[in-house]
């Protein structure tokens, strides 16, 4: 029985309000005591019975501007899994917007549902209403499990949706541009050449970002080995761009110069890192490191790592230009600056003898903490 129904059937209006407030406080306490909470500004959840919306929005930091971040739809095994994911993703967006130097903070939304079977216009509209209820504190967009069309449907119920401007192009193109620019910078640093001809790249995941990256790598003459848990996608992309296919459980340990994670997070961990043969890791997936200790582990194994939120910031930079003045040249130059930032991080890391991830975190934290009176 839902809380609302319990309120309606058993309690006076006053005790009902009190009951709801208590429930909200309990929910907040659950959020606040979560190990991934990290001083979030706001975490809020909504269940809508009619549309079956079961969603969480997290706003990590808004010192630089309104929090922005995509809406992920995923069939999480539990609400605890969804909460952990949204908190990690939202925090990551604060670092991403800061490192990309755009005037936004970090936020994220997740919907607990199977995007293949449970996504419906009613569900997306209800999500739009949820976003609208925060009055601009959080701006949503697409992520894994949501398409541009889905964001257009969400936008029928909120004015705080980004990435759907008619004149702009799909932000995933810009994400792939950023990953590609960082990948070339890593090759220049680690392999002594930014020409990717003959360089072998192992690509994990060929969804929106991965397959666009594969196109760029193919055009640059790289040898590509790819994997995707969706065998049909893997075969289609491999056939189009003359790639080899590896099993999903094997891709991180194939013989390659660069490993590029473009699936879901947590792929760099204590099990996989010792097995990685590539000396360089650059990819578009969010939250590639399972724990912060994995940053140091990569350094320990002599693997050059491009911080994920830097490599994949091209998409959010695209959204920034869509929300302000669309200027394709300025967008391209801004994305190229990601590679320059990566070079700067590598230099600082060498001087300070720190892992790249920690140096990137320090730069981002300086930027998003300095602007407000505490986080
Ligand atoms: P997507 O859902 O379109 O693609 C993900 C692909 O990875 C799918 O084809 C899926 O089958 C595959 N996959 C899942 N688990 C796998 C595994 N274990 N091994 C191999 N393949 C696997 O998502 P996307 O939009 O391409 O995003 C990919 C990643 O990049 C996500 O982490 C997302 O948060 C991040 N990201 C995306 C964008 C963007 O512009 N789309 C921007 C920034 C970050």
Image (cartoon, helix red, strand yellow):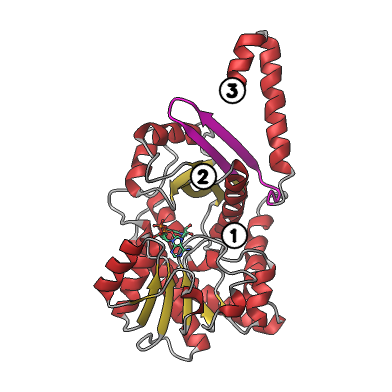
Could you say whether the residue bearing mark 1 is in a helix, strand or loop? helix
Judging depth in this view, the residue of 258 and 108 nearest the camera is: 258
55 inside magenta stretch: yes
- Note whether ligand 1 is within 8 Å of mark 2: no
Residue 9 percent location from the top left of the image:
61, 10
Residue 289 percent location from the top left of the image:
60, 66
Q: Please tell me in which quarter of the rendered image ligand 1 is found.
A: bottom left
Residue range in magenta is 36-58
Residue 99 percent location from the top left of the image:
56, 64
- Up the image or down, 274 lies above or below 283; here it is below
Kindly tell me whether residue 355 is visible in this rendering: no
- Residue at left 55%, top 66%? 267
Residue under numbered circle 3: 2
Q: Give the alpha-carbon distance from disc 2 to disc 3, as whole Å.
A: 21 Å
Q: Which of marks 2 and 3 is nearer the N terminus?
A: 3
Is mark 2 in CB contact (under 8 Å) with mark 3?
no
Q: Which of marks 2 and 1 is nearer the N terminus?
A: 1
Q: Give the alpha-carbon distance from disc 1 to disc 3, as whole Å.
A: 37 Å
Could you say whether the residue bearing mark 2 is in a helix, strand or loop? strand
Residue under numbered circle 1: 95
| Location of residue 80 (image quadrant) | top right
């Amino acid at each position: 029985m839902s809380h609302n129904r319990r309120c309606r059937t058993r309690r006076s209006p006053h005790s009902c309000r009190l009951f709801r407030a208590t429930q909200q406080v309990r929910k907040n306490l659950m959020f606040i005591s979560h190990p991934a909470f990290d001083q979030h500004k706001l975490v809020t959840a909504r269940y809508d019975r009619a549309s079956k919306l079961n969603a969480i929005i997290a706003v990590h930091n808004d010192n630089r501007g309104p929090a922005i971040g995509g809406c992920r739809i995923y069939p999480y095994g539990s609400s605890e899994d969804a909460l952990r994911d949204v908190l990690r993703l939202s925090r990551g967006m604060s670092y991403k917007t800061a490192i990309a130097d755009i005037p936004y903070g970090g936020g994220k939304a997740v919907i607990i549902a199977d995007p293949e079977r449970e996504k419906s216009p009613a569900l997306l509209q209800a999500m739009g209403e949820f976003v609208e209820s925060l009055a601009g504190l959080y701006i949503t967009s697409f992520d894994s499990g949501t398409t541009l069309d889905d964001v257009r449907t969400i936008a029928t119920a909120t004015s705080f949706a980004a990435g759907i401007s008619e004149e702009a192009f799909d932000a995933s193109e810009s994400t792939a541009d950023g990953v590609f620019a960082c990948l070339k910078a890593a090759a220049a640093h680690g392999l002594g050449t930014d020409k990717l001809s003959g360089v072998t790249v192992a690509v994990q995941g060929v969804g929106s970002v991965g397959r666009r990256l594969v196109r760029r790598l193919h055009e640059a003459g790289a040898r590509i080995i790819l994997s995707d848990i969706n065998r049909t996608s893997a075969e289609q992309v491999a056939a189009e761009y003359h790639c080899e296919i590896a099993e999903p459980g094997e891709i991180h340990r194939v013989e390659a110069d660069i490993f590029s994670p473009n699936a879901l997070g947590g792929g760099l961990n204590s099990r996989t890192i010792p097995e990685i043969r590539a000396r360089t890791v650059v990819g578009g997936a969010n939250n590639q490191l399972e724990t912060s200790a994995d940053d140091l582990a990569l350094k320990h194994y002599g693997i050059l790592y491009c911080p994920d939120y830097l490599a994949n910031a091209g998409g959010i930079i695209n959204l920034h230009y869509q929300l302000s003045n669309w200027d394709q040249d300025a967008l391209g130059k801004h994305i190229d600056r990601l590679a320059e930032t990566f070079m700067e991080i590598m230099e600082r890391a060498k001087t300070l003898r720190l892992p790249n991830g920690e140096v990137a975190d320090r730069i981002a934290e300086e930027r998003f903490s300095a602007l407000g009176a505490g986080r």
